[in-house]
Amino acid sequence: MAKKKGKNIEEPKQFTKYEKARILGSRALQISMGAPYLVKIDAKKLEEIRYSPLEIAKIEFDAGVIPITVIRPLPEVERAESSK
């Protein structure tokens, strides 16, 4: 666990389905806007998946090359100090 700007943050080892959907959607949007592919995909495979940005993003996600970071903020634990 790392600390950044006084808050507890944690880099996830496994993504939730919501995080995965957000990552894939963001990367698919980038690809649809003309971003270069981060993995080598042959023409036959591209024809198979019909150049679908979402399918290309899934291939990149499975290869672990998508440069998107997920940071989960953890709740801060407050300790009550007694003045007695």
Image (spheres, rainbow, N blue to C red):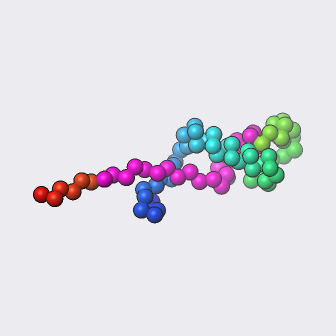
Question: Percent x, y for residue 25?
Answer: 69, 42
What residue is shown at x 79% (from left), y 54% (from top)?
36
Q: Up-down: is 55 above or below 66? A: above
Q: On the picture, is 37 further left or further right than 72?
A: right
Q: Quadrant of residue 22?
A: top right
Q: Is residue 57 magenta?
A: yes
What residue is shown at x 53% (from left), y 44% (from top)?
14
What is the tally of numbered marks visible in this picture? 0
What residue is shown at x 82% (from left), y 52% (from top)?
34
Q: On the picture, is 64 further left or further right than 15?
A: right
Question: Percent x, y for residue 2?
Answer: 45, 60
Question: Percent x, y for residue 56?
Answer: 76, 43
Q: Nearer the viewer, residue 7 or 44?
A: 7
Question: Percent x, y for residue 10?
Answer: 47, 53
Q: Nearer the viewer, residue 34 or 59?
A: 34
Pick out the residue farthest to the left: 84
What residue is shown at x 43% (from left), y 58% (from top)?
7
Q: Is residue 19 visible?
A: yes
Q: Give the quarter of the figure containing the N terminus.
A: bottom left
Q: Is residue 74 magenta?
A: yes
Q: Which residues are magenta?
A: 54-78
Q: Give the quarter of the figure containing the C terminus.
A: bottom left
Q: Quadrant of residue 57?
A: top right
Q: Is residue 39 visible?
A: no
Pick out the residue farthest to the front: 83
